[in-house]
Amino acid sequence: MIQRDYLIIGGGIGGGSVCEGIRQHDKKGSVTLVGGETFHPYKRWMLSKHFLRDKIPPSKKLPCMDERWYDTQKIEVRLGTVVTQFNIDRRLAVLGNGETIEFKKACLAMGSRPVRPQVAGFGLGNVIYLRTIRDALALREMSQSEKMIVVVGGGLLACEAAASLRQSKVKVAMMHRHPGLLNRYLDPETSAWVTEQFAKQGVTLLLDSSLNGFEGKTVLRNIQTKSGERVPAGVAVVACGSEPNLDIVRNTPLSGPHGSPVSDYLETEEKGIYAVGDLAFYPDRLLGGMRRQTHWENAREQGLVAGANITGKKRQRYEQIPYFWTEMFDLRLDFVGDFNVAPARVQLSGAYARSRFVLRYYQGEKLRGIVLCHHSANDVEAAKTELRQALGK
Ligand SMILES: Cc1cc2nc3c(=O)[nH]c(=O)nc-3n(C[C@H](O)[C@H](O)[C@H](O)COP(=O)(O)OP(=O)(O)OC[C@H]3O[C@@H](n4cnc5c(N)ncnc54)[C@H](O)[C@@H]3O)c2cc1C
């Protein structure tokens, strides 16, 4: 049986960062990183942006760091391998190939997967759920010969994919059940402005339209809306949210309805077992309440904190203002704070017409979120400081 001091499950940015955090504090402990994909941790966020548009090969620009780092740090990386069973009491993990790893401490970093709407034809060929390099390569390939691609959804991923495909000169339609794009994050006026930008770029908008099903024998032919409309499409990109990959810990305290519950230190209720990134349901010490984020910087920072804590040589709380960004056409939006609740009041500085503005979202008198359009990294840092100060932290 293989024995390890640390077992990291999931080879995304969260898992990769846990390895970095460990090696900052423990140079010798034995570490194994098990990842279901065949790539070392890579910049997943690029898949809907440059990677889709610019047709760059996977080895270029995508890796988070030089693969040799893992060798020099004596971190064993098992790619294309999944953990199929995780025994908390015996501290054992069984891999897809039948091997067993006995570990002292572990970190769950299995991330999330796209939600597959339970409608007819959701598994047809040419219905793409964009999550991995393989999905993006398939979409790239299909987009070269396809006349019309329908993107289902109106959130961040849907907007990014639609914009990149449109920039690659493909005809694109977006089907969204709400009248405005990015409505989950933006106030109605700004959402309407973003929607207008998409229309100006030639994206056909099927708004207020709910998905009823995908039609076709083996590959997609039409998409059906609940109101009975049939939209011809050879490819659909479905971006209707994500759910945490918690199958291996289902029905244990490591899995809850909102993710894997962890403490301020990102430790689960099982001592020595941590959880980070898209699947961690953590206490937000700055904005209050419990939160699960599915954004890059959160997974990166949580990985570093959990990596340090798991060694037992550090005891650090995770205390970051939530942050994410998005890029679509020539728009760059940065989101600082909490966007789960619609703002009661919005303060706009700047102008939509110049595509350069800042929005401050308030709940009562309390500042809860800041959106920056076309601002610098320094401005984003200043917004984080402003929000911290407003929260009195
Ligand atoms: C196309 C796209 C664009 C995005 N753009 C942005 C953006 O612009 N800004 C932003 O802030 N965020 C963005 N995100 C979100 C961001 O990429 C995620 O929040 C981040 O990747 C989460 O990291 P993670 O390590 O928690 O999980 P993941 O990146 O999902 O990695 C988890 C890994 O674990 C593996 N795994 C799962 N189960 C097992 C198992 N049982 N055994 C072994 N391995 C397993 C998976 O195969 C996967 O490789 C984007 C996401 C996507 C899909």
Image (spheres, rainbow, N blue to C red):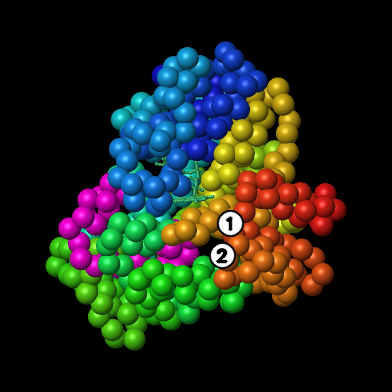
Is residue 323 or residue 14 the one in the foreground? Answer: 323
**Dot 1, crowdedness within 10 Å: few (<14), some or many (≥20)?**
some
Which residue is the site of mark 1?
374
Across and down, in percent, residue 166 comes to: 33, 62
Asked whether disc 2 touches disc 1, contact meaning CB atoms under 8 Å apart, the reply is yes
Across and down, in percent, residue 393 comes to: 83, 49
Q: Compare marks 2 and 1 and give the one earlier in the sequence.
A: 2
Across and down, in percent, residue 249 comes to: 49, 44
Is residue 381 or residue 115 the one in the foreground? Answer: 381
Question: Is disc 1 placed on a helix, strand or loop?
Answer: loop
The mark total stands at 2
**Residue at x-position 66% and y-position 50%:** 380
Question: Is disc 2 placed on a helix, strand or loop?
Answer: loop
Separation (CA) of disc 2 from disc 1 = 7 Å
Across and down, in percent, residue 168 comes to: 30, 56
Instruction: Please name the amino acid that badge 2 sits on.
Output: Ser
Left or right side of 335 for 227: left
**Residue at x-position 36% and y-position 53%:** 130
**Residue at x-position 65% and y-position 20%:** 25
Is residue 297 or residue 81 the one in the foreground? Answer: 297
Left or right side of 193 for 51: left
Q: Which residues are magenta?
A: 135-159
Kindly identify which numbered label has been placed on residue 355.
2
**Residue at x-position 30% and y-position 38%:** 57
Viewer can see residue 116: no
Q: Main secondary structure of the magenta part?
A: helix
**Residue sticking out furthest to the left:** 217
Whether the magenta-drawn stretch holds residue 92 is answered as no
